Image (cartoon, coloured by chain):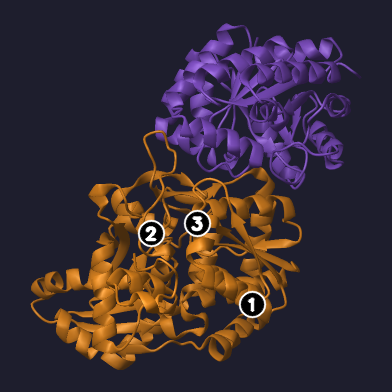
Chain colours: A purple, B orange
Amino acid sequence: MSIAETFAKAKSDNRAVLVGCMPAGFPTVDHSIEQMIAMHEAGCDVIEVELPYSDPVMDGPVIQKASDIALANGVRTRDTLKIIEAVASAGATVVLMTYWNPIEKYGVDAFARDLAAAGATGLITPDLIPDEAGEWIAASDKHRIDRTFLVAPSSTDERIAMTLENCRGFVYATALMGVTGARKSVSSQAPELVARIRAADPEMPVGVGLGVGNGDQAAEVAAFADGVIVGSALIRCVLEAPDRAAGLTRLRSLSSELAEGVRRR
Amino acid sequence: MTVLPDLAGHFGKYGGRFVPEALIKALDELEAAYRSAKQDDAFQSEFQDLLLNYAGTPSLLYPAKRLSAKLGAEIWLKREDLNHTGAHKVRNVLGQALLAKRMGKPRVIAETGAGQHGVASATAAALLDLECVVYMGETDTERQALNVARMRMLGATVVPVTNGSRTLKDALNEALRDWVSTVDTTHYLLGTAAGPHPFPEIVRDFVGGIGVEARQQSLDQIGRLPDAVAACVGGGSNAIGIFHAFVPDEGVRLYGFEAGGDGVQTGRHAASITGGSVGVLHGNRTYLLQDEDGQTIESHSISAGLDYPGVGPEHAWLHDTGRAAYEPVTDSEAMAAFQLLCRTEGIIPAIESSHALAGVAKIAPRLREELGRTPVIVVNLSGRGDKDVHTAGAYFGILDPVETVVPGENT
């Protein structure tokens, strides 16, 4: 299913989309595939694969640690594409989140081509703003990859409008001024930001990320957003589990809890 | 001549802004504050007053006669090592701390490698009554404990960074993460002429006095412009500081010497331009050390201040246009030059600046042949070597075991 179809279907079911994030190759290529498929089966509508990067400035300690483990175990960009292919063939809607340099190094057009061939429907770019994205916009148009740029509570109305014009699929609203990682409570800045996005473009689906860690928080965000994005809390299931089986069990259990949360409206 | 960067912060294809959207507003505010400060006489005179009466600039342009005789060139040293806090960096921190005040931000954060920028930031923060937090890789806090103590004496909080390679690049990542969360109250006092726009331009302008002074001093003391200007390049702030005023003088050759570590061919180096490739790191497009997947490769240099896997975008542009030439200098070449300056001039240079001196030793015979006479070379002696006494003492094995300053340093 494309991102647009996923959001449209959720809307007709009167619920929000659950986006679950997991770094590719964490802790190994095969294990990350298994985890992503488990998340998909347990209720994540969209699997957000994060390409591990040496300098993830937007990420908090949990995702940093998971990315470091993946890189230390030798994950390569081509492995990430393989992982996407495996998870997409299992029936999940897959988007990739990556910092910009690995794409620039791969070759922007070639990356868009191979990303589309692997079955990903979209790309989230945490450190690429539309102002610098000319080459990416051309390549993603050519290879039909949806573009998700970020907006933040600090974004001006002009920048929100400009960013929305360049997004396709959904826009990523960072709920608070900070890095990724679950928080005790959902940011009060998030509803206001979503309202500003809706005022600029009522049609664009809005995914809210940063700080969501359990079913109640997912329900809270689902009340005002089209999509709930969860990363660190899911990764922690694997990171902190005593063994592999326990990690998968926790991951399935949290995914179901979150999936129940996004249906509570 | 075209004025660079352009309005979006590009030097040709380099520079720009590759940062999370959350930081864009802060960068826009910083740019607006800087544009207005640039036109504001009160701001400029306050900055000049601090440079003159606090930092001890203009720094001397000193004819190094015994060194000149050894190297076969007429060498003039721009004595930034004599500035307060011991390096050119004081110029940048004073400028940015004044900007922070102007923007009404009571807190500054900084990244530091060897600790020099951290100490300079802590100094400016103490002087201007700002809260100061310095991020420093845990590996660096261990090998530069003295600077950690200096920062704390000056009232700064030093945060050891334990993720990634636990060095300067990770300290920079952590400072950016702090900034995303605290941008309303905090100015990021970036330490080199790199990072997202407008930092490369702001830092260049604040340290640009080095070149302006050196150019005028050359005219006054030498009676003409030099044949060449040389500087070491890590992130590249001291080099851009001395180059910038000379860029329009086509007869003046510009040389940047990168940290070649064990030698560029060994892969253990910090030479981003001569041993790296084009990519995006820490908010700007530039040359950097990266593997074939675009993952940053750790840099290696005996000089902690040059031990960084990227370089400022204006250097990338000066390299591509051919206006400046960049060459690597190995650890051992730099240490030989370090010793030479100590013994010929009675000046202990920073190991960073020793790279520039070693580079000059290499280009002097070439320039002599090309010009058919003794070349006149201005070298930016960007910092003093007090902070490097441990490293150099261990390198040369000049301390007896009983005289060891730091346990194990002679092994």
Query: Please, what is the three-letter code of the amino acid marked with disc 3?
Result: Thr
Classify mark 1: helix, strand or loop.
helix
Q: Is residue B158 above or below residue A66?
A: below
Earlier residue among tags 1 and 3: 3
Q: CA distance from mark 1 to mark 3?
A: 21 Å
Residue at 72% across, 13% down: A6
Q: Percent position (x, y) of residue A81?
A: 48, 20
Earlier residue among tags 3 and 2: 3
Residue underneath mark 2: B315
Picture quadrant where residue A152 is located? top right
Marked residue chain, label 3: B
Mark 1 or 2, which is nearer the eye? 1
Q: CA distance from mark 3 to mark 2?
A: 28 Å
Residue at 78% across, 38% down: A175
Query: Please, what is the three-letter code of the amino acid marked with disc 2?
Result: His
Residue underneath mark 1: B153
Q: Which mark is residue B139?
A: 3
Q: Is residue B273 left or right of residue B84?
A: left
Classify mark 2: helix, strand or loop.
helix
Question: Is residue B95 shown to the viewer in this render?
Answer: no
